[in-house]
Image (cartoon, rainbow, N blue to C red):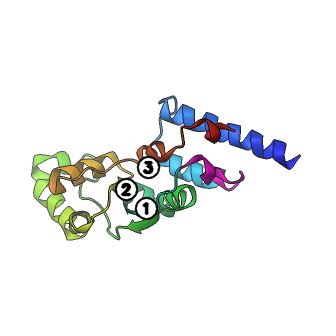
Amino acid sequence: MSTLLASAASNRLEALARRLFAGLLVLSFLEAVYLASYLTTIEAPQQKFNSYKEAILLHVHCHQKSLENAGDTAYVLQLLLGAKVNRVKSSCCGMAGGYGMKKENYEMSTKMANLVLIPNVEAFEGDYIVATGTSCRHQIHDLAQRTAVHLLDVLWDQLKMDATAHH
């Protein structure tokens, strides 16, 4: 019976991944909250992903931090990929949604980003910088000339696509 349940859970994870990556679910950082809770209900979800033992730099959007689930993104990366997640200990990237886009806020926005986030990004030598907020990813690109990606981009890159991953 447990094999049947594991197979059903595995099929549900595959179906979820397909919907996520096909763009049928419009999600922001809430997918990390959902995945973190969902992954505890299924057996061996990490078998669907290639292991990634390198460091990943993670900057969590301030709205996500305010909801007290900032650790969910790190948990998902660690559980599914075995990644070493280095969380940037900063308050905000300086964008605060659209705040940093306004001309009159540019100087303050840049100062905030340069306090902690941008020095961490510039010092990071790894391949993946994950930022959970769209505005955060833009700020990183604009001020550090580095590409930050979404959690789902990393999971997609590491998703096993061979025939054995689907059984």
- Of circles 1 and 3, the one toward us is 3
Q: Which residue is mark 3?
A: 151
Q: Residue drawn at (48%, 47%), measured in percent from left and top?
A: 158
- Residue 159 sits above or below residue 58 on the image: above
Q: CA distance from mark 2 to mark 3?
A: 12 Å
Q: Which residues are magenta?
A: 38-49
Q: Nearer the viewer, mark 2 or mark 3?
A: 3
Residue 116 image offset from top left, x and y in percent: 25, 70
Q: Which residue is mark 2?
A: 61
Q: CA distance from mark 1 to mark 3?
A: 15 Å
Q: Residue at x 56, y 38 (%)?
A: 162
For this rendering, which residue is in front, 96 or 25? 25
Q: Which residue is rendered at x = 12% and y = 53% of the image?
A: 106
Q: Quadrant of residue 85?
A: bottom left
Residue farthest to the right, as pictured: 1
Q: CA distance from mark 2 to mark 1?
A: 6 Å
How crowded pointer 1 is (Cα within 10 Å; few <14, some 14-19, many 20+) is rated as few
Q: Earlier in the sequence, mark 2 or mark 3?
A: 2
Q: Amino acid at mark 2?
A: His
Q: Label 3 near label 2: C-beta < 8 Å?
A: no
Q: Which residue is mark 1?
A: 65
How packed is label 3: few (under 14 Cα within 10 Å), some, or many (20 or more)?
Answer: many
Going from the N terminus, do you reach mark 1 or mark 3 first? 1
Relative to 25, residue 74 above or below? below
Q: Secondary structure at mark 3?
A: helix
Residue at position x 68%, y 56% in the image: 40
106 or 30: which is nearer to us?
Answer: 30
Q: Amino acid at mark 3?
A: Leu
The answer to whether mark 2 and mark 1 are in CB contact below 8 A is: yes
User: Of helix, strand and loop, which one carries label 1?
Assistant: helix
Residue type at tag 1 = Lys
